[in-house]
Amino acid sequence: HLHKYNIHIVTTCIILCWSLFCCQNKPYVMSKGAQLEGFCVDLLSEVAKKVGFKYKVQLVKDGAYGRQEESGNWNGMVGEVVRGEADLAIAPLTLTAAREKAVGMTKPFMQTGISILLRKDISEDAGFFDFLSPFSAQTWVGILIAYLGTAACIFIVARLVMKAWSQPQSEKNTFGLLHSLWYTAGALTLQGAGPHPKALSGRVICSSWWLFSVVLLACYFSNLSSTKTPESSHLMVKGFEDLANQDVIEYGCLAGSSTLAFFKNSNNPVYRRIYEHMERTKSFVSSMDEGIRRAKEGNYAFIGESVSLDLAVARYCELVRAHEVVGMRGYSIAAALGSPIIKNLSVAILQLSEAGELAYLRSKWWASSCIADKGKVSAVQPHNLKGIFLVLSLGLGLGTIVAVLELTFKSRRRAAEHKKTCCSVLTEELSLRLRTSSGNRSQENVDKDKEKA
């Protein structure tokens, strides 16, 4: 059996839409030609299917949600429901104690709270070490380890290979520890710091490090500009306490709103200070549009309901909402006190919530249009560069193995010439090349000196 109800969709959005102020209540209700669309329209359609009723949509006459006047009468859509001019009112209507006394209200179909909207560039001064932000701390530690490991490999390989140190008994090795560190740092900055290794093993290691450096620098510069965009975590005003403790940024909320009532009736000293400041400076705005406009202009923080602020952030990429949300409340559908449909509407809303339909409608109408924000790159983590770290590790290992093989082959030839064991000659060569002092001679050079004498 289908019942027919006369339902008023508020709203300020629609009434003001014809007055060129339709943005104020997007995306709850919007006009599309002769039709209406929006979150509340879709919600009403789904609820009507579950409860089983037909409806006729009208617009509230005064374009207000509903506030009790000094005479005790209610205006807006709440007043129309109280007077029987409408059976239901569906809109972002906050569930409050005063409204609950005047009309019946369903279970909330959306949760919201009070937060702060600011422009992104209202942020702290740049830190001394902001240039490190493209990479995470773990990534920088990995780069330091890779740098020291590569320098150590170049230093060891240069001592093992004859081409890098042709006359150990008389020449000082070019690639000492300090020069190896300097050479590796020069390659990392693409400046170069010759001379370059001549042996195959040294060239393998250096080629791996050069490839690592090119990829690393490409990732660094590609992320540097992205990480410069301030986020809400970097805001100078991170919450209401920060807002109350500063006098640089002006702030205010919608005049006559439930948000203002929250601060006015609160016993929290921080919230009281915020209310007293707004009353003293008369920093209220007359509409949501005005609050968003002032926030976009800068040096103004607009206090409002988090759901509406999230919508503004999705539409205007230069805005950001603070993380702190206080005074959690819900949006409900209003009906006359004692109306039998309230229970069924509440059940239908809970069913839609459990089925994920409300979340779908939220994602549909709150979709972000900020392409730049969607593509923003966060600090590079070590696992993002695991491939290039692996290539460098393989290059260092291969270069070290090649150096040891080169020295082993040379030791075998010399052992055959001098009729010694390969192990003894190899031990002598390793002892000479890995010794810090260059004054000792290898067995081969001693024999050469004897022959010359």
Image (cartoon, helix red, strand yellow):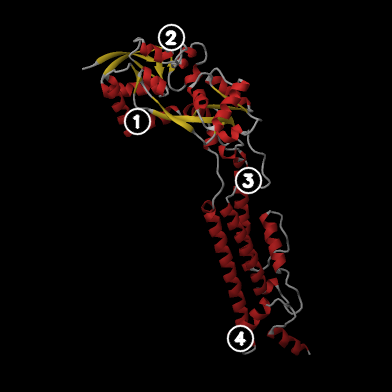
Amino acid under disc 3:
Phe
Q: Amino acid at mark 4?
A: Ser
The residue at 59%/69% (across/down) is 400
Label whose residue precedes the other's in the sequence (2 or 1): 2
Where residue 111 sits: x, y (%)?
41, 30
Whether residue 137 sits left or right of residue 361 in the image: it is right
Q: Residue 268 placed where, x, y %? A: 52, 32
Q: Nearer the viewer, mark 2 or mark 4?
A: 2
Q: Amino acid at mark 1?
A: Glu
Residue 177 image position (x, y, % from top left):
70, 68
Mark 2 in CB contact with mark 4 (< 8 angstroms): no
Which of pointers 1 and 3 lies earlier in the amino acid sequence?
Answer: 3
As helix, strand or loop, the secondary structure at mark 2 comes to loop
| Badge nearest the viewer, 1 or 4 | 1
Residue 231: x and y in percent read: 57, 38
Callout 2–callout 1 Cβ contact below 8 Å: no
